[in-house]
Amino acid sequence: MLTHPFLSPEWIGAVREIRADYTDRAGPVEFEVAANVTVTDPPFGPGPVKGHIDATGPALTIEEGHLDRPDFSIEIPYEVARQLFVQRDPAQVMPALMGGRVKLTGDSSKILLLAGSIAPPPGDDDRVALAREVLHRIDAVTA
């Protein structure tokens, strides 16, 4: 299986394909949040990576580009984004935030909802099993 650098155009395409495989199986999102994400200093390509996370509809979507009306916006260095989303270590966000490496604007209380959803909760119900399956497939394409 081919792997791609986290957030590279190839990685984004591979994750889109994975998401498409689960469109019919994904249940409703348990929280509502809309966030713009700007990842600075990626190790590939020029400029920052701009994307958004939208859990205001029937399913969580992570896609390129910014939303017009996000609840909050976050600017985060690539290495911290990788720790948060690939290594799934939300504890890394607070030191980066307190140290000024992560910049938040808007309703920062919503970031806690998002941080809590990065790693699936313990348990073995169908939703958790599905989340683990999706994350396993994403991990398999992430260099």
Image (tube, rainbow, N blue to C red):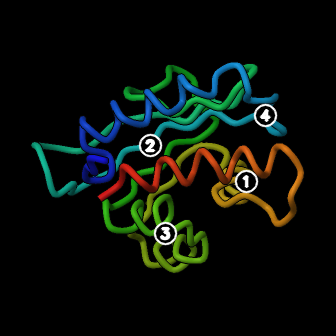
Callout 1: SS: loop
| 73 over 113 or under it: above or below | above
Mark 1 or 2, nearer chain start: 2
Q: Amino acid at mark 1?
A: Ser
Residue pointed to by mark 1 = 109
Q: Mark 4 and mark 1: span between their CA atoms?
A: 18 Å
Does the CB distance between marks 2 and 4 fall below 8 Å? no
Q: Nearer the viewer, mark 2 or mark 3?
A: 3
Residue 97 marker: none
Which residue is found at the position 49% from the left and 24% from the top?
Answer: 67
Q: How many other residues sit within 10 Å of disc 1, few (<14), some (14-19) or many (≥20)? A: few
Mark 2 or 4, nearer chain start: 4
Q: Nearer the viewer, mark 4 or mark 1?
A: 4
Residue 37 marker: 2
Q: Amino acid at mark 3?
A: Gln
Residue pointed to by mark 3 = 87
Mark 2 or 3, nearer chain start: 2
Q: Amino acid at mark 2?
A: Val
Q: Mark 1 and mark 2: span between their CA atoms?
A: 15 Å
Q: Amino acid at mark 4?
A: Val
Mark 4 or 1, nearer chain start: 4
Callout 3: SS: loop
Which residue is found at the position 33% from the left and 61% from the top?
Answer: 77
Q: Mark 3 and mark 1: span between their CA atoms?
A: 22 Å
Residue pointed to by mark 4 = 29
Specify the quadrant that holds the C terminus.
Answer: bottom left
x, y percent for residue 53: 55, 36
Q: Mark 2 and mark 4: span between their CA atoms?
A: 19 Å
Quarter residue 99 falls in: bottom left
Q: How many other residues sit within 10 Å of disc 2, few (<14), some (14-19) or many (≥20)? A: many
Q: Mark 4 and mark 3: span between their CA atoms?
A: 22 Å
Q: Observer-nearest residue: 143 or 8?
A: 143
